[in-house]
Image (spheres, rainbow, N blue to C red):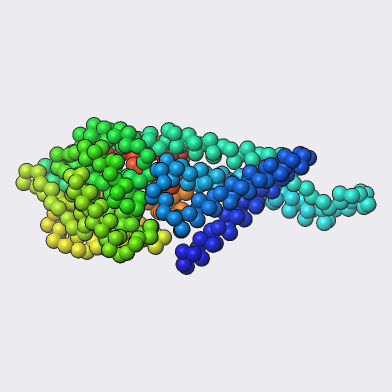
Amino acid sequence: MSINVRFIIIGLLLLLIDWYFYQAITTVLRGASVYRKTIVAYIYWGFTVFSFLVFLTPNFFSMDTWPKYIRVYLLALVIMAIISKIIGSLFILTDDIIRLFRWFGSLFSTPVEPVAENINRITRLKFLNQIALGMTALPLVGFIYGMVKGAFDYKVHKIKVVLPNLPSSFNGLKIVQISDIHSGSFVSASPIEEAVKIINQQNADLIFFTGDLVNNRASETEPLLEALSKIKAPMGVFSTLGNHDYGDYVVWDSVEAKRKNLDELKNTHAKLGWKLLMNEYVPLQKGDDQIAVIGIENWGGNLNFPKYGNLKKAHTDTSHYPVKLLLSHDPSHWNLEVKEEYKDIDITFSGHTHGFQFGIEIPGFKWSPSQYVYKQWAGLYNHENQYLYVNRGLGFLGYPGRVGILPEITVMELYNA
């Protein structure tokens, strides 16, 4: 399906939701003055037109020169409104289902006064539509809180994993994993500076970054270079690329321009002092013992994400290492290839999902819309003797906030017993 056709379908669907939600507004305004109804109509449909223009703009004009505050928060405003209207529409649907049953029941009832004006006229339930409008306000409040507080409320997840084959010299190895910084989404370096402090406070032996340093362009990292360059670990910082790092989601002037952007991003990893693994491995040594860190380019198994990664190439000549740690951005790679064909890879470190930046996490329970797309979407998973850890991401994309699923800094300790 072409991008234009997909855009038209999505546009029509959103327009249908707008119209459907507006029915609740007209019900609540029943009995209001014509002037008030007109003002509300102009505001409502004016915002709808405005939302469509926001989404259409990148197809005709580059937004890269716009102030970042406008780019980030303008899009967020539109997204929040759409999601809130979808939630409100679910309550309107409840009203329509009730009306349908009432209408169906009226077909089999005998009216007391056949000439009455309102026989078989099933009206909307005003209180349900009032509830629908009220419930629309709740997610808006939540989204605003998620932008002000949740986006930068960094949470440290500490876990321990036992690998029986782990050499004794590596017993207690501490790894910090971060992922999905999405530099272009930050309007200030201050939150990243705070995150870097927390990262370095963990005193990790080594640090993994599992992709999506940018949204689209290498230049997005410039305001954050000083802060990110302070991420240090005695055994090094190792990184890999995510789907957004290739610049696949913007229109370039030429193939050469896109290639140059990727080269600049690779150089950025080097400037930061990070070892970018491009379908390759590096040995780690402590005393007389060695283990392998493997890193591949993005390999997406869901939603047609690109498969640039080549694990076969990266895995070559690693058979003599007793433990292998893999950096692979997309967790679907573990599910579709790693645990099926590379059973000697002990742990895969991924990110990508962001936990949808929305959900519920309480002790013993977690839920997010992300789970309907990815079988493994946040936290630690295992299959037989293999593990996958999916980091919830440090940054954000689209909606500049987080509700329920907080930005994550992972601290994993490895033991052999």
The residue shown at (9%, 43%) is: 286
Q: Which residue is at 27% across, 61% downward?
A: 259
Query: For residue 193, what is the image quadrant?
Result: top left
Nearest to the observer: residue 301 or residue 245: 245
In this picture, residue 121 sits left or right of residue 2: right
- Residue 120: give x, y in percent of width and height: 83, 53
Q: Where is residue 183 in the image (x, y as percent from the top left)?
A: 33, 45
Quarter holding residue 62 = bottom left
Q: Can residue 328 be seen in this view?
A: no
| Residue 272 percent coordinates (x, y) | 20, 44
Q: Which quadrant is the C terminus positioned in?
A: top left
Q: Quadrant of residue 405?
A: top left
Name above or below for residue 234 compared with residue 264: above
User: Where is residue 247 shown, x and y percent of the image?
Assistant: 33, 57
Q: Residue at x 58, y 57 (%)?
A: 13
Q: How many marks?
A: 0
Q: Which residue is found at the position 55% from the left and 58% from the top? A: 11
Residue at the far bottom in the pictured view: 1
Q: Nearer the viewer, residue 36 or 229?
A: 36
Q: In this view, does 297 lie to the left or right of 368?
A: left
Q: Is residue 311 left or right of residue 377?
A: left
Q: Residue 369, can we see it?
A: yes
Q: Residue furthest left?
A: 288
Query: Is 193 left or right of 29, judged from the image as shown?
Result: left
Residue closer to the observer: 122 or 378: 122
